[in-house]
Amino acid sequence: MQIQPYLNFDGRCDEAIAFYKRAVGAEVKVLMRWKDAPDKSMCTPENAEKVMHSSITMGDTTVMMSDGRHTGHPEFKGISLSLIAKDQPEAEKTFKALGDGGQVQMALAKTFFSPAFGMVADRFGVTWMVVVM
């Protein structure tokens, strides 16, 4: 069994995909737009170019995402994505990249359980816990 996150970016999915490609080297595996749905009744002029479903990989992890209801105000509450870095330089680089346009919630620093751990909400509001194990 696998559990994979599915994130709804509420109209900002294309922007999120481009950001994660730059920030963490994400690769797009699947990208479907509403205009490509076999049931054309699902497509409206407002959502035609929006992302109906996408699947990207970040390292060994698959993250699925879409535009959801595409109102432009994504909300991510009560969940964090943990990113395990191989060493402190990778953690620092990744933390900085994810924080570009976002907000540091806990600065990346040495803790009792890791040589580097920090929390940052990216520009979309997704909270990331970056840790070296």
Image: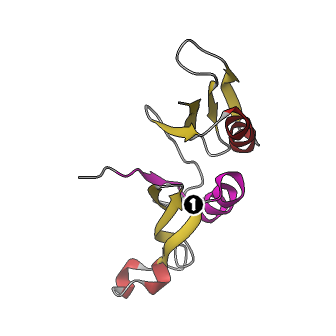
Taking the spot 51% from the left edge, 61% from the top edge, the residue there is: 57
Between 50 and 28, the one lying in front of the other is 28
User: Is-magenta flag for residue 10?
Assistant: yes
Horizontally, residue 55 falls left or right of residue 11, namely left
Where, by quadrant of the figure, is residue 6 drawn? bottom left
Q: Please tell me whether mark 1 sits on a helix, a strand or a loop.
A: loop
Horizontally, residue 19 falls left or right of residue 128, namely right
User: Is-magenta flag for residue 83?
Assistant: no
Estimate the x, y position of residue 59 in percent, counting from the top left. Answer: 54, 55
Horizontally, residue 96 falls left or right of residue 121, namely right
Taking the spot 31% from the left edge, 49% from the top edge, the residue there is: 3
Estimate the x, y position of residue 25 in percent, counting from the top left. Answer: 65, 58
Q: Is residue 97 above or below residue 54?
A: above
Q: Amino acid at mark 1?
A: Gly
Where, by quadrant of the figure, is residue 123 drawn? top right
Q: Is residue 91 above or below residue 8?
A: above
Taking the spot 38% from the left edge, 78% from the top edge, the residue there is: 42
Estimate the x, y position of residue 85 in percent, counting from the top left. Answer: 59, 39
Q: Is residue 74 above or below residue 55?
A: above
Residue at the extreme left of the image, as rendered: 1
Estimate the x, y position of residue 8 in percent, counting from the top left. Answer: 47, 54
Taking the spot 70% from the left edge, 52% from the top edge, the residue there is: 23
Q: Which residue is mark 1?
A: 11
Between 75 and 122, the one lying in front of the other is 122
Which residues fall within the magenta stretch?
4-25
In this figure, which colouring scheme has been used for the structure?
Answer: secondary structure
